[in-house]
Image (tube, rainbow, N blue to C red):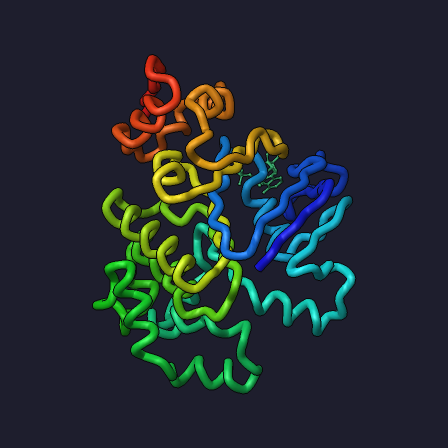
């Protein structure tokens, strides 16, 4: 899916009226099938941007376009159809406590289903192999019939991500997918997401606090700070100086769950003398 925003101002959805915008005069173009990591310190506006792109947050100013359609000029029905072509994976997936994992995973298909089909699917999961395949990509197939309230935080996060693999959406908007995962599962998840998106020609936009993962898995990196784009570059052009400046005063966030070697390699490629601060 092709995306464009132009001169957007938007407030965080929970911000009280009159608050300063979390996104300020932002413009951006994303082509079909692109994979982009959004990085930047806490409060930079990454989640707010995802909400604008998912057509759930109407900006106060500027233009949004998904596949050449302005969502805010569509009828309710057309807007619903457009939203059915994208899927959001929030950092903490909203999973009904007593629901089975299989039902939660197959909920990834709900936006594309009729009301009758979706009600039926809550009681009779129709595609067990698809749910199993999705969970296997994230090393969780054995939990397919488990109740979600009996899972750990990291397992719940993987259930939320497994929804992406069964969804027919052409745009994946993923918010901090690795926050509850151990380093091995984090790599596995990142690899599964980027490989699947590439196979299916899906546009993937992913916010990440793990800069090492962003550098390792994405070809285009957008650095946000204070609601503005600081850089928007092919990964190989992102320099240590840019990262240091992006996270200035928030260096402790720079190496969230560090793969020091990877970041150092990236740093060496551009400026061999850089010092990496590992604050966690
Ligand atoms: N619950 C809230 N109520 C009011 N304002 C908020 C709220 N959450 C965030 N904001 C405002 O919106 C701005 C952008 O927040 P947003 O969540 O988009 O940033 P982020 O880059 O995703 O941060 P993080 O990495 O911590 O998730 C914040 O700087 C803050 O000013």
Tell me if 98 is positioned left or right of 86 in this view: left
Q: Position of residue 75 (x, y in %)?
A: 76, 70
Q: Quadrant of residue 134?
A: bottom left
For the C terminus, give its image quadrant: top left
Q: Position of residue 212 (x, y in %)?
A: 35, 35
The correct choice, above or below, for 53 with respect to 147 in the image is: above
Residue drawn where x is 58% and y is 38% of the image: 45
Residue drawn where x is 34% and y is 19% of the image: 277
Residue drawn where x is 38% and y is 74% of the image: 103
Residue nearest the viewer, comparing 236 with 218: 236
Q: Is residue 44 visible?
A: yes
Q: Position of residue 166 (x, y in %)?
A: 41, 70
Tell me if 250 is positioned left or right of 53 in this view: left
Residue at far top of view: 273
Q: Is residue 21 visible?
A: no
Q: Position of residue 240 (x, y in %)?
A: 42, 22
The correct choice, above or below, for 11 with respect to 87 in the image is: above
Tell me if 146 is positioned left or right of 88 in this view: left
State ligand 1's quadrant: top right
Count how many numbered circles sit on residues in the image: 0
Residue drawn where x is 75% and y is 59% of the image: 72
The correct choice, above or below, for 224 with respect to 175 in the image is: above
For the N terminus, give its image quadrant: bottom right
The correct choice, above or below, for 269 with respect to 145 in the image is: above
Residue nearest the viewer, comparing 147 with 267: 267
């Amino acid at each position: 899916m092709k995306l464009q925003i132009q001169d957007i101002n938007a407030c965080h959805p929970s911000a009280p009226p009159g608050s300063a915008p979390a996104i300020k005069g932002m413009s951006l173009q994303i082509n079909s099938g692109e994979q982009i990591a959004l990085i930047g310190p806490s409060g930079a506006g990454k989640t707010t941007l995802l909400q604008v792109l998912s057509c759930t947050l109407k900006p106060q100013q500027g233009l949004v376009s998904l596949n050449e359609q302005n969502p805010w000029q569509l009828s309710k029905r057309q807007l619903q159809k457009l939203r059915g072509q994208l899927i959001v994976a929030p950092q903490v997936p909203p999973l009904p406590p007593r629901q089975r994992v299989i039902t939660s995973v197959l909920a990834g298909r709900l936006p594309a289903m009729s009301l009758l089909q979706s009600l039926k699917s809550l009681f009779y999961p129709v595609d067990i192999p698809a749910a199993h395949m999705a969970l296997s990509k994230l090393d969780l197939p054995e939990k397919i019939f488990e109740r979600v309230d009996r899972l750990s935080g990291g397992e719940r996060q993987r259930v939320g991500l497994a929804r992406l693999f069964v969804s027919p959406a052409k745009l994946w908007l993923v918010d901090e997918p690795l926050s509850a995962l151990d380093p091995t599962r984090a790599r596995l998840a990142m690899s599964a997401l980027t490989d699947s998106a590439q196979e299916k020609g899906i546009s993937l936009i992913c916010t990440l606090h793990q800069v090492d993962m962003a550098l390792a898995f994405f070809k285009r990196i957008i650095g946000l700070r204070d609601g503005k784009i600081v850089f928007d570059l092919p990964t190989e052009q992102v320099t240590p100086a840019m990262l240091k400046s992006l996270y200035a005063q928030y260096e402790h966030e720079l190496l969230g769950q560090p793969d020091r070697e990877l970041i150092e390699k990236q740093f060496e490629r551009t400026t061999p003398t850089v010092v990496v601060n590992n604050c966690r």
